[in-house]
Image (cartoon, rainbow, N blue to C red):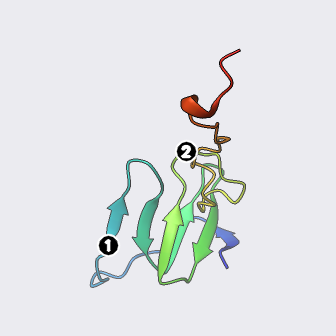
Amino acid sequence: MPSTSDRGPRPVPAAAPARRVSVDPQGPVLVEGPVEIVRDDGTVARSDRFMVAVCTCRRSRTYPWCDTSHRRRERADPPPEDRDPR
């Protein structure tokens, strides 16, 4: 589970392996973990998971982690042909 810890970014070793990032235009940014995110207030959110979904819409209740709040929540209306025309 992601956690919040100390303030400020940690130094990155010179030979650190590159992280793979996948951008979904309709959803989160997927980052191969572990991941640390420095928030606007300087706190650090960390996840040790192998893949992390980072929220880009800011609707997530677990921001900066995605909780799929970006998905539309719509009620399914019956098809037009099934409706009573009156």
Task: Name the residue beneath numbered marker 2.
Answer: 57
Amino acid found under the numbered disc labelled 2: Cys
**Residue found farthest to the top:** 86
- Residue 6 visible from this viewpoint: yes
Amino acid found under the numbered disc labelled 1: Arg
Residue at 54% over, 64% down: 37
Could you tell me which secondary element the residue under label 2 belongs to? loop
Q: Relative to residue 78, is residue 51 depicted above or below?
A: below
* For marks 2 and 1 on the same chain, the one whose residue lies earlier in the sequence: 1
Task: Name the residue beneath numbered marker 1.
Answer: 20
For label 1, count other residues whose C-alpha is less than 10 Å away and answer few (under 14), some (14-19) or many (20+): few
Q: Marks 2/1: CA distance?
A: 20 Å
Residue at 60% over, 55% down: 39
Camera-side residue of 60 and 6: 60
Residue at 65% over, 45% down: 73
Q: Quadrant of residue 23?
A: bottom left
Task: Give the image location of residue 7, x and y in percent.
Answer: 64, 65
Camera-side residue of 44 and 19: 19
Q: Relative to residue 19, is residue 65 depicted above or below?
A: above
Could you tell me which secondary element the residue under label 1 belongs to? loop
Q: Quadrant of residue 57?
A: top right
2 vs 1, front mark: 2
Task: Give the image location of residue 40, x and y in percent.
Answer: 60, 49
Work out which quarter of the rendered image holds the C terminus and state it: top right
* 13 lies left or right of 49: left
Say how many tags the image has. Answer: 2
Work out which quarter of the rendered image holds the N terminus and state it: bottom right
Residue at 51% over, 49% down: 56
Task: Give the image location of residue 27, x and y in percent.
Answer: 47, 53
Q: Relative to residue 23, is residue 57 depicted above or below?
A: above
